[in-house]
Amino acid sequence: MRLATFTLAGVTRLGLVEGDEIADLAAADPAMPRDLRSLLESGPDGLAATKAAAGRAPRHALAEVRLEAPIRDPRKFLGIGMSYRSHAEEIRRRGRPVPDHQNWFNKQVSAVNGPYDPIHRPRVSTQLDYEGEVALVIGRRGRHVRAADAAEMIAGFMVCNDVSVRDWQARAPTATLGKSFDTHAPIGPWMTTWDELGDPTRLSLRTWVDDELRQDGGTAELMYTFGEMIEELTTVFTLEPGDVITTGTTHGVAQYRDPPPWLQPGQRVRVEVEGLGHIENLVIEEPFPPSA
């Protein structure tokens, strides 16, 4: 299944994407959850009800609806750094050490953004960078999960751009500030379930800035399996339905080019992952809040 959050006529609800249409699940069954996190919290019964409702749901053309972030309010949004071999190598060439263990950070959940919504270049920095990634969505609650059992924890996969503000990322070892500016976590365009995707370990991952291909890699480069990532995290804390885990980026980020081609207002960033679709975001100057 490809499950999406969409808005039509000012109302946001959950849909199932089939081809170039989206099935309006709430219109078929008013008892259906209106958001993906609630659906995942309902467990296998909720997913079974989704399949049943999809068979009788009215359809809308995708072109007629606004796709939102599939998970608009995750409790946790976690990212791993230096998990792709090619990215680790470009870091080593610049003299930076690559840790011998998994290197995790938080993105604040207020950074979550839609798959086609603008991303802001902050007023406080020009060092705006892209990181095309595969994101995991957690489907069930778990603690101390072994890597071999971790597949049961994953509800599905999304495309993510782990937008990074590099000078603010360097301000503290946690990297949290530079990873958490508002709008800097566009995800989507929908969540693809594992049974729909097949093998996630051989997916191509590409990032374009306008018409220039900046990143061209794939999940075969990962230094850690998805299971090992989940085992590491659940050793420390409980993962819950709807939590988002971004799994790292391949080589080609702006930071390690000479000179760095930082993102500029007016440019478009497109991240495409095989089997998952693409997201595309226009870079704009950070607007002043109304109160200013």
Image (cartoon, rainbow, N blue to C red):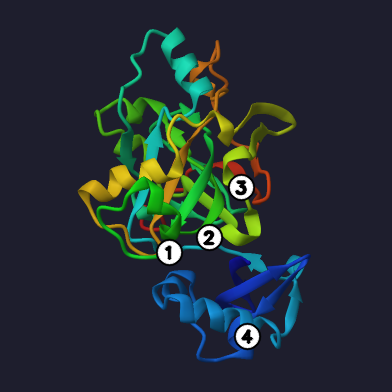
Residues packed near mark 3 inside 10 Å, few (<14), some (14 to 19) or many (20 plus): few
Q: Amino acid at mark 4?
A: Ala
Is disc 4 in contact with disc 3, using a CB cutoff of under 8 Å?
no
Q: In the rendering, at what x and y percent does residue 118 appear?
A: 57, 49
- Disc sitting over residue 204 in the figure: none
Mark sitting earlier along the chain (4/1): 4
Is disc 4 in contact with disc 1, using a CB cutoff of under 8 Å?
no
| Residue ID for mark 1 | 139
- Mark yes or no: residue 105 visible: yes
Provide the secondary structure element on which disc 1 rests. loop
Mark sitting earlier along the chain (3/2): 2
Which label sits in the foreground, 1 or 2? 1
Report the residue at 58% width, 46% height from top: 200
Q: Nearer the viewer, residue 216 or 220?
A: 220
| Residue ID for mark 4 | 53
Mark sitting earlier along the chain (4/2): 4
Residues packed near mark 1 inside 10 Å, few (<14), some (14 to 19) or many (20 plus): many
Report the residue at 23% width, 47% height from top: 235
Q: Amino acid at mark 2?
A: Ala
Which label sits in the foreground, 4 or 3? 3
Is disc 3 in contact with disc 2, using a CB cutoff of under 8 Å?
no
